[in-house]
Image: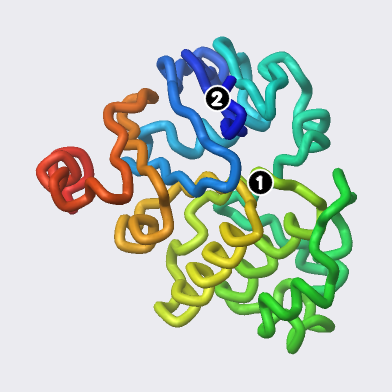
């Protein structure tokens, strides 16, 4: 494993019951890098995030996290190795206040952001700290779902469709936060339908189809690989 490599996924297969969803996913993520898994709905991108964290059914292959094989570890042990997951459905506790939601997850490692640091990064949440989860807008809920995992000390962030359905001004704010997290040396995997959101943020993009990586595109190759993007994504 390379000194700069934080995650290596090799020949990863994942199943939900009898459904075989991932068919040999292969990719690496370097420490401090942001990568994006691009593809159409049903391609296997969300399942890849869930499989990394052990939230699917049976898995085979290899998932090396910071030099440790985690394919057979339970989810809570993988999380304790510094993995934070922001699911598409956000998972905000409606009966808790914004701040109670923030304080709920346990710390898995030192180095998590303090509440003050989180409120500096997400001023909207500071304004709404005492508001119930149900009273937050969709954009505020998305910010809260992201902010919540930053308190835990996780260094690998799995972000699933964080721009979906949000107003452009909120999408812009979330992109700004992801840039700040990259500067702080977080390692980030973005699952995105929104190519225009993901492309400027990701150092590398992996096109996923039928549970496999079909192509890898580096940030500097976007222009010359437009035909490939059009073929797989229609962009």
How many numbered discs sit on the rendered protein? 2
Q: Is residue 133 above or below residue 213?
A: below
Q: Is residue 133 left or right of residue 27?
A: right
Mark sitting on residue 8: 2
Q: Nearer the viewer, mark 1 or mark 2?
A: 2
Residue 173: where, in percent of width, then height? 52, 76
Q: Residues within 10 Å of mark 2 (few under 14, many from 20)?
A: many
Residue at disc 1, secondary structure: strand
Residue 200, quarter of picture? bottom left
Between residues 129 and 225, which one lies in front from this camera angle? 225
x and y percentages locating residue 133 in the rendered image:
74, 72
Query: Which residue was labeled with disc 1?
Result: 85
Left or right: 85 in relation to 223 = right
Q: How many residues crowd around disc 1 within 10 Å: few (fewer than 14), some, or many (20 or more)?
A: many
Q: Does the CB distance between marks 1 and 2 fall below 8 Å? A: no
Name the outermost residue toward the left: 227
Q: Nearer the viewer, residue 213 or 28?
A: 28
Q: As drawn, is 131 to the left or to the right of 156? A: right
Is residue 24 depicted above or below 41 in this figure?
Answer: above
Q: Earlier in the sequence, mark 1 or mark 2?
A: 2
Q: Secondary structure at mark 2?
A: strand
Image-quadrant location for residue 99: bottom right
């Amino acid at each position: 494993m390379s000194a700069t490599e934080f995650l290596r996924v090799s020949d990863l297969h994942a199943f939900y019951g009898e459904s075989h969803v991932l068919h040999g996913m292969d990719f690496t993520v370097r420490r401090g890098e942001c990568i994006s898994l691009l593809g159409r709905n049903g391609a296997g991108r969300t399942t890849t995030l869930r499989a990394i964290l052990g939230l699917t059914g049976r898995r085979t292959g290899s998932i090396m996290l910071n030099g440790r094989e985690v394919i057979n570890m339970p989810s809570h042990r993988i999380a304790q190795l510094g993995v934070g997951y922001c699911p598409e459905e956000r998972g905000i506790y409606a009966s808790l206040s914004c701040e109670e939601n923030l304080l709920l997850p346990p710390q898995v490692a030192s180095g998590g952001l303090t509440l003050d640091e989180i409120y500096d990064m997400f001023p909207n949440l500071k304004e709404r700290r005492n508001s119930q989860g149900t009273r937050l807008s969709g954009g505020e809920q998305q910010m809260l779902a992201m902010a919540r995992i930053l308190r835990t000390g996780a260094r690998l962030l799995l972000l699933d469709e964080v721009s979906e359905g949000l107003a452009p001004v909120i999408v812009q704010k979330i992109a700004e936060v992801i840039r700040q997290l990259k500067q702080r040396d977080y390692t980030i995997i973005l699952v995105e339908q929104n190519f225009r959101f993901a492309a400027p943020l990701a150092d590398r993009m992996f096109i996923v189809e039928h549970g496999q990586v079909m192509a890898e595109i580096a940030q500097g190759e976007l222009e010359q690989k437009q035909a490939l993007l059009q073929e797989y994504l229609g962009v």
